[in-house]
Image (cartoon, rainbow, N blue to C red):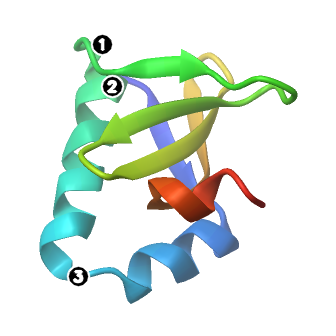
Amino acid sequence: MKEIFVTREAQKSLKRMQPQRRAAIFAKLDAYARGEAVDIKKMQGNPYFRIRVGHDRIVIDDLGRVIMVIDAGPRGSIYQR
């Protein structure tokens, strides 16, 4: 299983979310860390990946044994950063 680290910016975004949305995001991250199939795509223009969780997106950097959560939030605003 891979380790999950969350950046300070992602922590702020997750803290502002409703508990149910936050729980769904962490459940999807745990599934990806265990090697289960998730909706993941390489982002264009930067080295990161995005994982889809309903209307929310998680921007991650997969470093092999470590998953770095860069940011998380609604689909419309997450790509504008």
Point out residue 8 in the picture as x, y percentages from the top left corner.
67, 74
Please give left or right for residue 70 compared with residue 81 in the image: left
How many numbered callouts?
Answer: 3
Q: Determine which residue is flagged by label 2.
A: 32
Q: Report if the CB atoms under discs 1 and 2 are less than 8 Å apart.
A: yes
Which of the two residues, 55 or 41, is positioned nearer the viewer here? Answer: 55
Of the image marks 1 and 3, the number of the one nearer the N terminus: 3
Point out residue 24 in the picture as x, y percentages from the top left corner.
18, 54
Q: Residue furthest front?
A: 76
Point out residue 11 in the picture as x, y percentages from the top left corner.
53, 74
Which of the two residues, 56 or 58, is positioned nearer the viewer here? Answer: 56
Residue beneath the point at 53% across and 58% down? 76
SS assignment at label 1: loop
Point out residue 47 in the picture as x, y percentages from the top left corner.
81, 25
Amino acid on which the number 1 mark rests in the picture: Gly
Q: Determine which residue is flagged by label 1.
A: 35
Measured along the vertical axis of the image, is residue 34 above or below residue 71? Answer: above
Mark sitting on residue 18 = 3
Measured along the vertical axis of the image, is residue 3 above or below residue 56? Answer: above
Which marked residue is nearer to the observer: mark 3 or mark 2? 3
Amino acid on which the number 2 mark rests in the picture: Tyr
Q: CA distance from mark 1 to mark 3?
A: 26 Å
Amino acid on which the number 3 mark rests in the picture: Gln
Location of the C terminus by quadrant is bottom right
Residue beneath the point at 71% across and 30% down? 48
SS assignment at label 2: helix
